[in-house]
Image: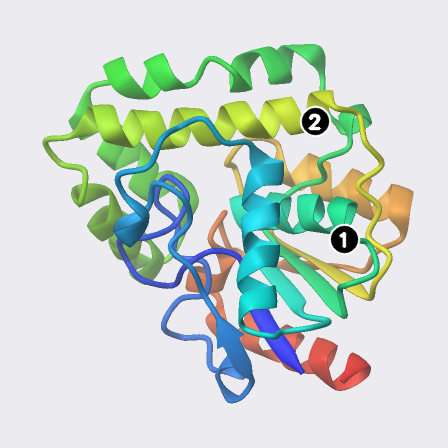
Amino acid sequence: MYVFTVVSRAPKRGVGGSNPLGDGLQSVRKYNIIVWDAPAHASSWPFRFDFDLFDKAKWLNGILEKEEIIKPIIIGQSMGGYVGQAYAQLYPDRLTGFISIDSAPLQRNYVTAVEIWLLKRMEPVYAHYPWKLLLKSGTKGVATSNYGRNLMKEMMLVYDGDQHRYAQIAGHGFRILAEAMEKDLPYEIKCPSLLICGTKDHAGSGIRYNREWHRKTKIPLKWIEGAGHNSNTDKPEMINSLLEEFFSNIL
């Protein structure tokens, strides 16, 4: 059985600056794992910003087919969770399991028109926001632990002196997310699933989204007490335990 995470673990890789699994997570390392440098990140740069969320899901599927991986488990943190849902929409019968870590549902009925409007216009905000303030707010806004905040700072500093690229990556990510929501597709998860969210995740409306996601779909939801948006870097031991429990129930 293969465990696949749709975003990279390397410090300078991720979507706009997230460390999806973190060095503290050991549970998945005894399984077969594939990680990737998402488009426009790390070794996948330079990359043209003309792709959407479904392109990413198709490329993901191409990687899995190339590696002869069938019936994967997708673990998606933040943007990775959205790619996982797009994958489930395109290939509904190919997943063994899906775990969302500090992500949110793609269904249109969870978001307001104002939220979608804002998502499409984030690039100039990131481009013109004073870099030092952006670095400070970005670091403290995604994690509550020193470990998590230091990781975020390290990743953001990769773009020190190239704020334009950082704004492009983040803005494009928000934009394709909004476009996927506007498609108003079912994004049904047909495999065993788990939602994980930090109780102090203040990156957008993640807490509200996850609460409603759980209420409407009955997918189990585990709250990580005191963790921020990158709960895997704030409370890696707790995430480890949840992953082990999930795997033991379906493998």
The quarter of the picture where the C terminus appears is bottom right
Q: Position of residue 70 (x, y in %)?
A: 69, 73
Looking at the picture, how far across and down is residue 80, in whole percent? 55, 50
Q: Are marks 1 and 2 in contact (CB under 8 Å)?
A: no
Q: CA distance from mark 1 to mark 2?
A: 18 Å
Nearer mark to the viewer, of 1 and 2: 1
The answer, for residue 24, to whether it is visible in the render is yes
Upstream in sequence: badge 1 or badge 2:
1
Quarter occupied by residue 95: bottom right
Q: Report x, y in % for residue 157.
A: 17, 43
Residue under label 2:
181
Q: Name the kind of residue labelled 2 in the image.
A: Met
Q: How many numbered discs sit on the rendered protein?
A: 2
Disc 2 is placed on an element classified as helix
Location of the N terminus (image quadrant):
bottom right
Query: In the displayed structure, would residue 106 be above or below residue 217?
Result: above
Relative to residue 88, is residue 208 depicted above or below? above
Q: Between residues 249 and 34, which one lies in front from this camera angle?
A: 34
- Secondary structure beneath disc 1? loop
Residue under the image location 47 percent in, 56 percent down:
7
Q: Which residue is mark 1?
A: 91
Outermost front residue = 66
| Residue at x 45% of width, y 65% of height | 35
In screen coordinates, is 84 left or right of 12? right
Asked if one can make out residue 77 in the rendered structure from this viewpoint, the answer is no
